[in-house]
């Protein structure tokens, strides 16, 4: 038992001795380095300048991560937009083609032209009819008085440029007078009917 304790103590002392010797060597090396510092002052200054340069480079390089972050954020935004593409709403504007407008305009113009042709044709037919009647009267040479009257009308038409206007006004006046006479006759008939009705009612009362 005592031998085991002695062996353990010996081993412990050996390890402790080695560690102490190692620490002594490190201390000796540090002391030698400290002694050499004055001789290496210029080298230390160079190292410090190099460190300062590295610090400035690090400061400049520190901006790069910020730019990368901004670029990354933009990429994320573009990615989100691509995931949700804009909805294209197609609005159908019903534009009437110009050809249809042109066709409508031509149709209206054709209607106006046809109306003008119809009116002109109607007037022409009236003139032809009047001319035919006048010529027929001229062929009846047996009526001397009629021929003289037609001659007078021809002379009056040539002498008075507004002869046609006066004839039309006179014709319109005759037409109005005829309508007035018809209205008067109708009122007279209604008055007689009322008188008869009043007489019958009077007889019933008596």
Image (tube, rainbow, N blue to C red):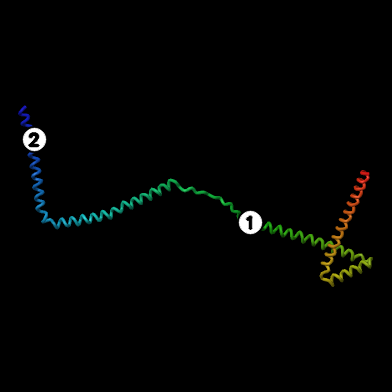
Is 182 left or right of 9, judged from the image as shown?
right
Q: Please tell me which residue is depicted at 92% across the width and 66% down the height of the picture.
A: 146
Q: Residues within 10 Å of mark 2 (few under 14, many from 20)?
A: few
Mark earlier in primary sequence (1, 2): 2
Q: Distance between the residues labelled 1 and 2?
A: 117 Å
Q: Is residue 174 above or below residue 33?
A: below
Could you tell me which quadrant the N terminus lies in? top left
Q: Residue furthest front?
A: 206
Please tell me how many numbered marks the rendered image carries.
Answer: 2
Q: In which quarter of the image is residue 104?
A: bottom right
Q: Considering the numbered disc 1 on the image, is that residue within a helix, a strand or a loop?
A: helix
What percent of the width, then of the height, locates residue 81? 43, 48
Q: Please tell me which residue is depicted at 34% across the width and 50% down the height of the picture.
A: 69
Q: Name the residue under label 2.
A: 12
Q: Mark 1 points at which residue?
A: 101
Q: How crowded is mark 1: few (under 14 residues within 10 Å), some or many (20 or more)?
A: few
């Amino acid at each position: 038992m005592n031998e085991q304790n002695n062996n353990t103590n010996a081993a412990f002392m050996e390890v402790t001795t080695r560690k102490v010797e190692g620490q002594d060597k490190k201390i000796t090396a540090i002391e030698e380095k400290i002694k050499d510092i004055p001789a290496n002052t210029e080298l230390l200054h160079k190292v410090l300048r190099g460190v300062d340069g590295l610090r400035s480079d690090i400061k400049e390089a520190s901006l790069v991560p910020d730019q990368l972050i901004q670029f990354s954020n933009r990429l994320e935004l573009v990615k989100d937009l691509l995931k949700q593409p804009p909805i294209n709403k197609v609005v159908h504007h019903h534009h009437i083609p110009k050809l249809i407008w042109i066709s409508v305009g031509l149709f209206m113009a054709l209607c106006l032209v046809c109306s003008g042709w119809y009116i002109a044709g109607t007037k022409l037919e009236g003139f032809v009819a009047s001319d035919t009647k006048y010529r027929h009267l001229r062929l009846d040479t047996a009526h001397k008085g009629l021929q003289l009257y037609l001659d007078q009308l021809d002379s009056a038409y040539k002498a008075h440029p507004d002869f046609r206007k006066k004839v039309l006004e006179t014709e319109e006046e005759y037409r109005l007078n005829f309508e007035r006479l018809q209205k008067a006759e109708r009122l007279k008939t209604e008055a007689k009917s009322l008188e008869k009705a009043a007489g019958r009612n009077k007889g019933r009362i008596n």
